[in-house]
Image: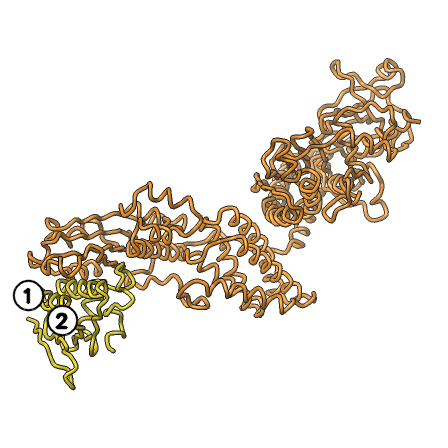
Chain colours: A yellow, B orange
Amino acid sequence: MGNITWHDKAGGRGRTLKLEGALTIETASELKHVLLQVLETAEPLEMNMSAVESIDLACVQVLCSAHCSFHQANRKMTLAGEIPEGIHAALEALAISPDACDSPCTPECPWRKGEGHE
Amino acid sequence: MDAPKQLYREEAFELLADLEEALIELEQQPGDLDTVNRIFRAMHTIKGSGAMFGFDDIASFTHTIETAYDLIREEKLSVDEELISLTLRSCDQIKVMLDASQGGEDADASLTGEITASFRKLISSVEGTPQERDDSCPADTGGEQGNGLKAETTYRIRFKPHRELFRNGTNPIPLLNEIRGLGHAHVICHLKELPGLKDLDPEACYTYWDIILTTDKDIDSIRDVFIFVEHISDIEVTKIDDYGEIDHEEYKKIGEILFDRGDISLGDLESILGRQKRIGELLVESGKARRSEVQSALVEQEHVRNLRKKRMGTMPVDGASSIRVASQKLDSLVNLVGELVTVQARLTQLSAQRNDTDLTLVSEEVERLTAELRDNAMGIRMLPIGTTFGKFKRLVRDLSTELGKEVDFTTSGEETELDKTVIDRLGDPLVHLIRNSIDHGIESPEAREAAGKPAGGTIRLTAEHSGAYVLISVSDDGAGLDTEAIRAKAMEKGLISPDANLSEKEIFELVLAPGFSTARSVSKVSGRGVGMDVVTSSIESFGGTVEIASAKGSGTTITLKLPLTLAIIDGLLVTISDEYFVMPLNAVVECVELSADDRRHTHGRNLARVRGEIVPYIPLREVFSLDGDNPAIEQVVVTEIGERRIGFVVDKVVGQHQTVIKNLGKFLRHVEGVSGATIMGDGTVALILDINKLTQQAEFTEKYQTVH
């Protein structure tokens, strides 16, 4: 089961949403809830997924949908830290790639290999 | 130049001829990928073999062009007139480079650079394309299986789970991996149904996949993978390629694939196809299809094309079973066969005299084998005439552009075979005829429209067999011949008398007379007054004839009638006094007797009555001034030239004779009325009569006597 926690950034400049463990369908609802909350506030979103061990399609869909919604609302959803291999492996197995995606947020797609950090 | 290099040059020139033809075709049908592939392959061979034989300049020059055509093949670059012209210029430049290797002038390096730069510009205009083509392995499909030799089938699978997939406890990853395990697969994921975060049901599946799978497993094995999800998914499995489909590497166009998949409607496709742009771009631009759908269709297209290309690479090619032989070797083979035919005739003659059964048996066997050998040797020299048609397409394109005329050039009968020697000598006359058609025949677009014709003219070049002849005609739908103008010009030149009563056909024939030209202006293209007679003499020099048919306002057709071969003919052996002569058998219609009585009936005029029809004849004894008296009963060999019948009076008809044509040598080359000689079985020489020339001479003498 995955774990979703907020961490204060160093120097008290905002928060980072840290995702850890196995992000499966059991975590999907919570993940959506948290992300929607941020979307409805004016707060910028920074996520760290470096401790994610694995991810399933349900959670990938939530993250993709969130990224798209943030883009539509002209808001930034950025990643801190590396995208771990477990996520890349799942994306590859699911054949999810920004190259075959229609979403207008594709240019800043977090799944683009090698672009998962700032 | 060493032999391999020479071989490369010959091959490169042939490839360039084919290339030019393909380029003109591509200009007319810019979307034809077969033609693009043909061009690409030709460029690839020119480049590859060039590098192998030390033509590095050609190899590096061609490399850039090849890269551009690879992009066209992948439909990343569109074909337009500029590209075609640029490639045609490249062909010319390669020719110069080839000539330079044989002591010709060096290729203009700045022109090479200019052409290369233009191609590079085109290549770099394609977004995200590497500058040059990677040669390593374009056909690599990357799969564990893909050696292309198994009986593999390619399927398109659309796996579209219902929303409740996850609630059922199903993870699609193992399913997709299982499919991948069946063979070589490309999986494309579609997320287009994914809603915004607010409307998203985190436990519903919004994703679906297209899978292109090449496998040696059957369709049931594929369906088995989905057996536990088929009640909560839409699964479509379609066979899109089969091992048996090897006849072409081409695969469906993007529009067809999307229509097959149900991603777009036929109406969408048709409305988009009307525009001149790449279909994928258009569909996305117009919102008819999503980029992901087009991308997925592209993946399918590439998957199948690569597969077919690979498969084709493993198939034995026809070319591998043929060899290239220098034409001199063939010529000497035919000469030897000719000698053999002569010796065989002698043997036959001897065996007939000896009346020896054993000898007769052997002689008959040799006769049969010789005839077979002759036919085979002649067959080797036969080439399809289409090999020369290609260069005319280029000629028409260049000339019509130069003269500001619109000309559509069509050909037919390319497969018609003709002796190589005839084909080699046919080039110049045909160039002349086609030039004439464009320059004098086809009118300017304005004049055509004023005459109620379409602005663009048509020139047709056709070839067909007709007995022992091949008919090649050049026809246009231009202005046609102006009989009055021809008549006036002929009178001015003193070719006819003012009161000459000529039929339309006779007037047309005047055009073929030496020094005749009706062109109002001398242009670069034609009209230098050395026109048609050059064509006529060249065609007649190898036993052919030229005929003109024309209707004012609707066009002209010029037909060349050519003998199939120049080396051996079937002849009719005749004698006059003690001399032997051979007449080409294919012109002979029949033989009739001519008695002294018959001669008296016509009051000394050279006319014979053949079943009620009057046939003029030529007394060969007089023509060749041979000694001896006419026998009481002579023979008239009636021949047909064009549509006319002409008789030739000889003493005796000996019979059919297979004739190996020998040149008369340079001292006797200009003797008129004789086209060659042949050696008889007993070693005596028989002259081969040029019945065309003899007829013309007789007509000339007749007219001269009438006029003066």
Q: Nearer the viewer, residue A17 or B157?
A: A17
Whole-number angstrom distance, CA of label 1 to CA of label 2:
13 Å
Side of B118 relative to B405 (left or right): left
Residue A88, above or below B283 = below
| Chain for disc number 1 | A
Amino acid beneath label 2:
Ser
| Chain for disc number 2 | A
Residue B346 occupies which quadrant of the picture?
top right
Q: Secondary structure at mark 2?
A: strand
Amino acid beneath label 1:
Glu
Q: Residue A42: x percent and y percent?
A: 16, 70
Side of B197 relative to B480 (left or right): left
Q: Secondary structure at mark 1?
A: helix
Q: Nearer the viewer, residue B236 or B291?
A: B291
Does residue B471 show up? no
Q: Earlier in the sequence, mark 1 or mark 2?
A: 1
Cβ–Cβ under 8 Å for marks 1 and 2: no
Mark 1 Cα-neighbour bin, 10 Å: few <14, some 14–19, many ≥20: some
Look at mark 1 in the image and give the residue it sits on: A26
Mark 2 Cα-neighbour bin, 10 Å: few <14, some 14–19, many ≥20: some
Position of the C terminus of chain A, as image quadrant, is bottom left
Foreground tag (1 vs 2): 1
Residue drawn at (61%, 50%), measured in percent from left and top?
B394
Look at mark 2 in the image and give the residue it sits on: A54
Q: Residue B392: x percent and y percent?
A: 63, 47
Q: Nearer the viewer, residue B142 or B133?
A: B133
